[in-house]
Amino acid sequence: MKNNFMKKSIFVIQKHDATTLHYDFRIEVDGVLKSWAVPKGPSLNPKDKRLAIMTTDHKMSYAKFEGVIPEGEYGAGVVMIWDKGTYKNIKETDGKIVPIKKCLKEGRAEIFLDGEKLKGGFALIKMKNSDKNWLLIKMKDEFADARRNPVSSEPRSAVTSRTLKEIEKDVK
Ligand code: MN
């Protein structure tokens, strides 16, 4: 019997030093990576509302990319896999999980991340009167932590432990 019920979907956060440094937050939805650019990166403090600008869907294979996008190409700059793992859709209405596609269409998703740096529930909430501006907010749970700031305290790759500078140097 085909049963995708237990299949976990992946997420990846790529630290991307392009025109400006940002974090590309990507989640697997129906075979593509739905993507948001988060200028300040994720926060574990539920009081922080991090701007997350929806960008184009990426191919699943892009989740494994760490390296340098050459000058002249879209997104030119260094890309690091800053965090990766799986996520679970936890958005419920009347005790039932709302399909993630519906959540995204309605502008409110709640996902539970099981990454190497990030764990716990995060909400993605679309801003009113905006096409592409969302907010990424840590939900209140046991993993919320206003003192821990992994964006600054854990700057290295989740895959290779390299810094952005080391990734850049390795391709030269
Ligand atoms: Mn980017």
Image (cartoon, helix red, strand yellow):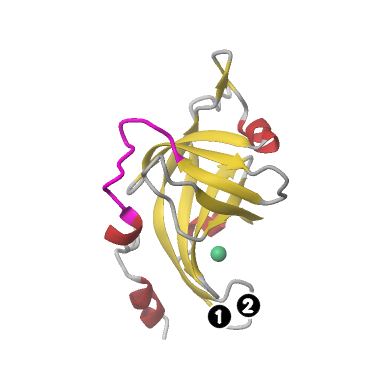
Along the line of sight, the residue nearer the viewer: 123 or 29:
123
**Residue 84 in sight from this viewpoint:** yes
Image quadrant of ligand 1 equals: bottom right
Q: What element carries label 2?
A: loop
Q: Is residue 43 magenta?
A: no
Looking at mark 1, is its residue's CB closer than 8 Å to ligand 1?
Answer: no
Name the spot of residue 159 as percent of width and height, x first.
35, 59
Q: What stretch is highlighted in magenta?
A: 138-150
> Which residue is outermost to the top?
94
Looking at mark 2, is its residue's CB closer than 8 Å to ligand 1?
Answer: no
Up-down: is 167 above or below 62?
A: below
The residue lying at 58 percent from left, 40 percent from top is 125
Residue that mark 2 sits on: 73
Q: For marks 1 and 2, give the CA distance.
A: 6 Å
Q: Mark 1 belongs to which amino acid?
A: Pro
Name the spot of residue 149 as percent of width and height, x first.
31, 53
Along the line of sight, the residue nearer the viewer: 148 or 80:
148
Q: In which quarter of the image is the C terminus?
A: bottom left
Q: In which quarter of the image is the N terminus?
A: top right
Name the spot of residue 134 as percent of width and height, x first.
60, 47
Up-down: is 147 above or below 14?
A: above
> Which residue is outermost to the bottom?
172
Up-down: is 89 above or below 154?
A: above
Residue that mark 1 sits on: 70
How many other residues sit within 10 Å of disc 2, few (<14), some (14-19) or many (≥20)?
Answer: few
Q: Of helix, strand and loop, which mostly describes the magenta segment?
A: loop
Q: Mark 2 belongs to which amino acid?
A: Glu
Q: Is residue 142 magenta?
A: yes
**Residue 57 in sight from this viewpoint:** no
How many other residues sit within 10 Å of disc 1, few (<14), some (14-19) or many (≥20)?
Answer: few
Mark 1–mark 2 contact, CB under 8 Å? yes
Please identify the quarter of the rendering in which residue 28 is found. top right
